[in-house]
Amino acid sequence: MEQKAEFGMYGLPVDVKYCKKCVISNQRPSSVVEFKNTESSKKRTIGFDNEGVCEACRYAENKKSINWQEREEELHKMLARFRSPDGNYDCIVPGSGGKDSIVAAHVLRYKYNMNPLLVTWAPHLYTIPGRRNFEAWVNAGFDNITYTPNQKVHRLITKLAFENLVHPFQPFIIGQKNVAPKVASLYKIPLVVYGENEAEYGNPIKDNDKATRSTKFFTYEQRLEEIYLGGVNAKKLITDYGLTRADIEPYMPIAPEAAESLKMEVHYLGYYLRWDPQWAYYYSVENTDFYPNDQRTEGSYSKYNSLDDKIDWFHFYTYFIKFGIGRATYDAAQEVRNGHITRDEGVRLVKRFDGEFPKQYFRDNLEYMGVTEQKFYEIIDRARPPHLWKQVNQKWQLRQQVS
Ligand SMILES: [Zn+2]
């Protein structure tokens, strides 16, 4: 991988900066999944303004001046366009039973009188709290369609994604992103509603100023040669890895015409309602059988974020290796922004927990992907950008940390 003056491995800015208000660094990539990307010379990372404050913090400030009453009226109007008069499904809520999908489904049904159908792309490996919370979600009074991909195929692509991109979660993200519009198309349900907007965490602020997501994010001309899974071209997956076109289908987005003919719309409740992860957590506990893990999550201090899938633990660890941003940073940054902890507390939590090795499901994850322990460390160590990592007495250390 080439090392440029300004941008290093993965196209990250080599000059590492930390937000003055929260604990995030300028290494955080925007989490847009692209089909074409395997390597890009310059990645879009979270923006910092000239006062050294990140986009996510600026958005959190902007949120204070939003007239939420007006936004809720907009929500009423939007939902009125779709609401079924006879109890048929009128919207889809994608998710896995995390707190955000619980809140989204619950408020739509019980506060706004909608009839959501829940759609789930099955986790690779359910955790016990993940499975329990999935059941709490569905048992709160919903129908659910869970799509479980062919595990032989999914394991292979997950392994390739780990080996080629050091991103074992990529096939899940792609599958999950595409399954809801597909079910929408199949059942002729034109409205898909997510809870929180991912933009809260530092995608371009302009993405937060509208309620909808462009259909470009979930439609694509179905040209195999332009689609990559696990860093391998889809055509090559067929010729070199023995997969069939049908094996790849679950990962394919719907065609633009399918979304157009249905007049499909994708909305985020986070635009209409004042969304805050901690609020979402309390709401879930109060209104359903959701409950947090009985222990803190490795790599963080929290007990209720991203618990569904054992691969989450690997995912956050690889993220830490590649970008120097671990689960504690991720959790603390948003809690600082929402005023639950101070920046100093955030810094201490990051120093204490960030990058902790994910022991708990280590064996399960290796076995799932069919990767040996030795191979795992080889891949991990190759993935460390030199501008972030150094070796001291044969031990890897981050060159800098938030302070
Ligand atoms: Zn910030």
Image: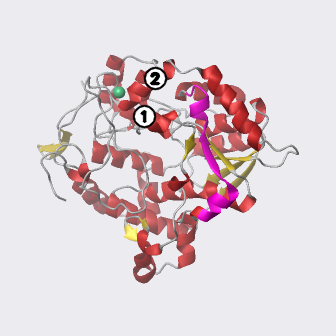
Left or right position of 242 against 20: right
Ranked by sequence position, the earlier of labels 2 and 1 is 2
Dot 1 surroundings within 10 Å: few (below 14), some, or many (20 or more)? some
Mark 2 lies on a secondary structure that is helix
* Colouring: secondary structure
Q: Position of residue 298 (x, y in %)?
A: 41, 38
Left or right position of 99 against 295: right
| 3D distance between C-alphas at marks 2 and 1 | 10 Å
Is label 1's Cβ within 8 Å of ligand 1?
A: no
Q: Position of residue 278 (x, y in %)?
A: 54, 25
**Residue at the limit of the structure toward the right, as seen here:** 86
Asked if the residue under mark 1 is in contact with the one under mark 2, i.e. CB atoms within 8 Å, the reply is yes
Which disc is residue 205 wearing? 1
Vertical placement of 266 versus 371: above or below?
Answer: above
Identify the image quadrant of the N terminus.
bottom left
Which quadrant holds residue 37? bottom left
Whether residue 297 appears in this view of the structure is no
Q: Quadrant of ligand 1?
A: top left
Which disc is residue 62 wearing? 2
The stretch of residues the image draws in magenta is 257-275
Identify the image quadrant of the C terminus.
top left
Which residue type carries mark 1? Ile
Which residue type carries mark 2? Asn
Dot 2 surroundings within 10 Å: few (below 14), some, or many (20 or more)? few
